[in-house]
Amino acid sequence: MNSRSNASRTEKIQRRLEAGSLATHFPEVAGIVVSMSYSQRGMKLAMPRTVNFVPSSYALFSIDCLSKGCVDGGFDLTHVIAGMVRNRKESTKGELTCMGGPAHDHSSIAYEVAIQYAH
């Protein structure tokens, strides 16, 4: 289990390095705030979370699933954020379901993305 955990951690670090910075990919963006509310079958309350991206942040907009035992899951907001920047949109809302497994207890998020552009 430790070697699998270490391999997973190493893979995440490599993905971050390959992603580059927000400033490199989106120099017109001053900051991004992603507010989300996690829901999971069996949870009575949704769990709120906010993630802030600044120009020096990695341009990796994938949020891990919190479901125990989830395999290769998470919520990828890359297309949402890239589309917003392309259209110079300042805010959007939506929902995503975890794409990992096991399917019986998938998590989902309701999200709001707000982008502040440099002047």
Image: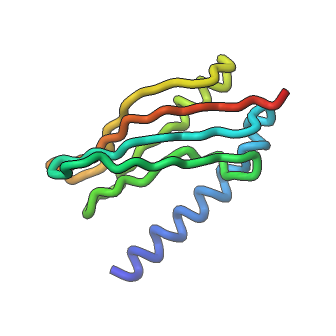
Farthest residue to the front: give it. 45
In the depicted structure, whether residue 13 falls above or below residue 115: below
Q: Nearer the viewer, residue 99 or 119?
A: 119
Q: Nearer the viewer, residue 64 or 52?
A: 52
What coloring was used for the rendering?
rainbow
Q: Where is residue 45 in the image (x, y as percent from the top left)?
A: 25, 48
Which picture quadrant has residue 87? top right
Going 65% across and 31% down the picture, which residue do you hit?
A: 115
Asked if residue 85 lies left or right of residue 62, the reply is: right
Going 53% across and 29% down the picture, which residue do you hit?
A: 80
Q: Quadrant of the C terminus?
A: top right
Asked if residue 55 lies left or right of residue 33, the reply is: right
Farthest residue to the right: give it. 119
Which picture quadrant has residue 25? top right
Q: Quadrant of the N terminus?
A: bottom left
Task: Please tell me how many numbered marks the rendered image carries.
Answer: 0
Q: Where is residue 79 in the image (x, y as percent from the top left)?
A: 53, 31
Going 34% across and 50% down the picture, which residue do you hit?
A: 47
Q: Position of residue 53 (x, y in %)?
A: 65, 46
